[in-house]
Amino acid sequence: MAGVSDVPAPSPARRAFPPNWPLRIGLVALALYVFYASSILNITWARFVEGFGHGGRFLSRMFPPNFAADKLALLYSGMFESLQIAILATVFGILFSVPLGLAAARNLSFAPLAWFTRGLIALLRSFHPVILAILFVKAVGFGALAGVLALIVASMGFLSKLIAEAAEEISMKQMEAIRATGAPFLSVLVIAVAPQIMPRFIGFSAYQLDSNLRNSALVGLVGGGGIGATLFTAFQRFDYDFVLTIVLAIIFTVTVGEILSGWMRRLFQ
Amino acid sequence: MDASVRSAKSANDSAGHALELRNLSKEYRAGIQVLKNISLKFAGRGIAAIIGPSGTGKSTLIRCINRLTDPTSGEILFMGTDLAQLKGRRLREARRKIGMVFQEYNLVERLSVIENVLCGRLGYLPAWRAWLRRFPAKDIERAFSLLDSVGLGDFANERADRLSGGQRQRVGIARALMQDPNLVLADEPTSSLDPKTSVEIMELIARQAAAQGIPVIVNIHNVELAKRYADRVIGMSKGEVVFDGPPKALEHSHLLQIYGGEGWLE
């Protein structure tokens, strides 16, 4: 208020922008904490500058990318496996998500089942795909199977939640009309519910395929098979030029996947 | 169409009454009765129009008949059984014989017109056949001829959401008739339509009901339409039947009693 001395001070009740003290205190506290945390973790400017040097050397060792025939063969087989992991995980993820999502929809299911299923979905969603992959590698051993299982579970968490949400937004009137014809419950689902959620269902299934493609590289890093495993080995052998080849291939595949899934979504909108 | 029409007729004729309601009551909240001890008998043919102000229980009454809403107490006698007692499979089987037409048509918007008409047969079809759209050829043929008879023969493969309101209601009527019903319930079938289309829709309902010998119970706001098309008018006020008789017997004083007040009539 100091700058407006020529204007009579407005009464506090009429201030257009009253100070938000909780927000101010919160922001100051956050700034103090960030300062404290970075000093504890020994994050200093000197280390950051030193890191730049390391990074530069690392990048220079990546060039030129390695396109040797034996490396390309490794790349192909790894990429092929990753694609398979992504597609299998998406297909089975969708299959398992449909009943789970419908059971979680409060307008289609009955309350205890809906709440139980919601809890189950929340549990599935609480783990990152990499954590799931570590668990499954321990359970079923190294390789693509662990990757597929991890991504199925991750897909189920994502898809069933969205299916439940889409199902809860449908028009109950259309459903009621089908119920009034004496149709069995499954027919009501197939005829009145499915068409209403189909555009969104295809949309997020395509998105899930796209995201499984990216995550299939990730789960390989922890032993889940596919291109991630190839990438991890290349790192450990200091084959940085091959690492670049793999990274380029992943970028290419993910971009193509994204274009395809976007195209699929537009087609079915 | 002809064979099924005859079967519907004979079922009604032999039963005497298509439907009888005994002491039907409904409370949405305990102690507040929306329907108060309604007892009505409906003949095996003809149109019965229920008139009355909004919020008087007309919709609740009609929805109780096919149990889209569950009555609190009372009996609903239809084809020799009390619908109020039915559950699960037996309730679904009873619903197959009651067609319903809705105020907002309630078509499945993303399905084609012919698919919507065929929905009337879902009660007779296992779900997997519904999923694969494997309806019996006889049903498909009948669906096409019903579409012709409601004047939408050329729209069979259009998506329902591309139709106008009047056209959608015609599909709704065809879907109800597709059930080969012994009774049709129409809940405000013209309230979302313009006056001209409303007349056309009532005309269609009356014509089809007469041709196929199906009794119709229709909720309607428009008193003129009710008088013009109904064989019987039932006036409701505050959850009770306050008038029941032929349209000719409906007088000014009855309308006052049904709707209350004076000003709106002048």
Image: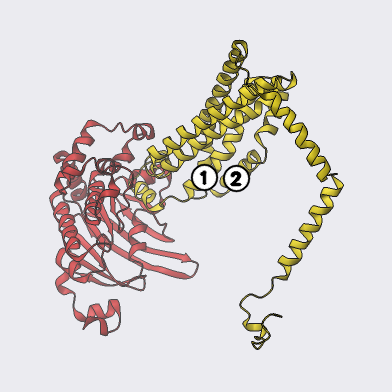
Chain colours: A yellow, B red
Distance Cα–Cα, label 2 vs label 1: 9 Å
N-terminal of the pair, mark 2 or mark 1, is 2
Front position in the image: A150 or B107? A150
Front position in the image: A254 or B93? A254
* Disc 1 chain ID: A
User: Looking at the figure, which quarter contains the N terminus of chain A?
Assistant: bottom right
User: Looking at the figure, which quarter contains the C terminus of chain A?
Assistant: top left
> Amino acid under label 1?
Ala
As drawn, is A223 to the left or to the right of B81? right
**Percent from the top left, x then y, of residue B179?**
26, 44
Q: Can residue A247 be seen in this view?
A: yes
Cβ atoms under marks 2 and 1 closer than 8 Å: yes
Secondary structure at numbered mark 1: helix
The residue depicted at 19 percent of the width and 74 percent of the height is: B250
Please give the label number shown on residue A42.
Answer: none
**Percent from the top left, x then y, of residue B232?**
19, 65
Q: Is residue A141 visible?
A: no
Please give the label number shown on residue A164.
Answer: 1
Secondary structure at numbered mark 2: helix
As drawn, is B56 to the left or to the right of A241? left
Q: Residues within 10 Å of mark 2 (few under 14, many from 20)?
A: many
The image quarter in which residue B165 lies: bottom left
As drawn, is A4 to the left or to the right of A29? left
Where does label 2 land, which residue? A118
**Percent from the top left, x then y, of residue A42?**
85, 44
Q: In this view, does B261 lie above or below B26?
A: below
The residue depicted at 57 percent of the width and 40 percent of the height is: A158
